[in-house]
Image (spheres, helix red, strand yellow):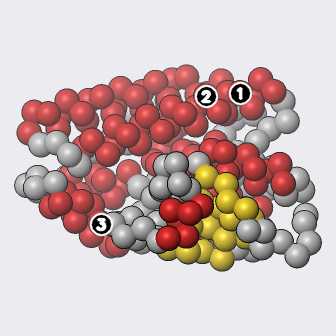
Amino acid sequence: MEEESSVQLHGMWASPYAHWVKYALEIKGIEFEYKEENLGDKSELLLQYNPVYKKVPVLVHNGLPIAESMIILEYIDETWADPPHLLPKNPLLRAKYRFWAAYFQLIFQTMQKTLLTEGEAHQDVKKELLKKLDVVEQEIIQVFQNGLPSFKDVKPDYLDIMMYSILGTSKELEEFFNTELMTAQRYPLLFSWVEAIDENFEVKEVRPSKVKLLEFLKAMQQKQHIPA
């Protein structure tokens, strides 16, 4: 691990993309300074560090910025090369990790749509979301060579934190919309995966509180003028 290393993370507490990086830093045991950003009034530093997309997260390592969450995670794993590793060394398995990470981003985009729709349109988006979750439940098992890890003896990795930062809030979404989404009956693998990661200490330290998240979802919905 590098000596005299200065690390800052510019993020926003409700952003799963920022959570990916926070989880990775905690799991790798990297000390960092966190900078909370107001995305409605972005700081000059954020605009300076990420002039192309102007969004979080941005990792600043020894004064040099790295943007885009998936790129940041790979940078972290390559720069701090000591275990635990985020990405597998096997090229084929590493490619599978990247594939599913990109698919989880599509799932998150669909989840965002649930806040922007109502009535029949909302039900259509929910069906779309469930179909995407069906695909993960049926197909992602190919990634797990030895079954789902318990995380008692191993740390969550790249794919674990990608999944958890998005699906780890499914219970809050269910409560907010008064509906069922990721049930143990329909999604036994995904449900068990989330439950296993829930017990990890680093995850508990980073995960936003239920009350704060529900308040945020309500504010987002009101901003879009969508009735509850």
Q: Using the image as rendered, state which of residue 109 and residue 177 is in the foreground.
A: 109
Cβ atoms at labels 2 and 3 below 8 Å apart: no
Question: What residue lies at 65% left-to-right and 33% top-to-bottom?
Answer: 98
Question: What residue lies at 30% left-to-right and 53% top-to-bottom?
Answer: 173
Q: CA distance from mark 3 to mark 1?
A: 34 Å
Residue 120 point in image, percent of width and height: 10, 33
Q: Is residue 33 left or right of residue 120?
A: right
Amino acid under disc 3: Phe
Amino acid under disc 1: Ala
Work out whether residue 13 can be spotted. Answer: no
Report the residue marked by disc 2: 99
Dot 2 lies on which element? helix
Report the residue marked by disc 3: 216
Dot 3 lies on which element? helix
Q: Within 10 Å of the Cα at label 2, are there few (<14), some (14-19), or many (20+) other Cα atoms?
A: few
Q: Is residue 121 left or right of residue 67?
A: left
Q: Within 10 Å of the Cα at label 1, are there few (<14), some (14-19), or many (20+) other Cα atoms?
A: few
Report the residue marked by disc 1: 95
Question: What residue lies at 38% left-to-right and 40% top-to-bottom?
Answer: 109
Q: Using the image as rendered, state which of residue 78 and residue 48 is in the foreground.
A: 48
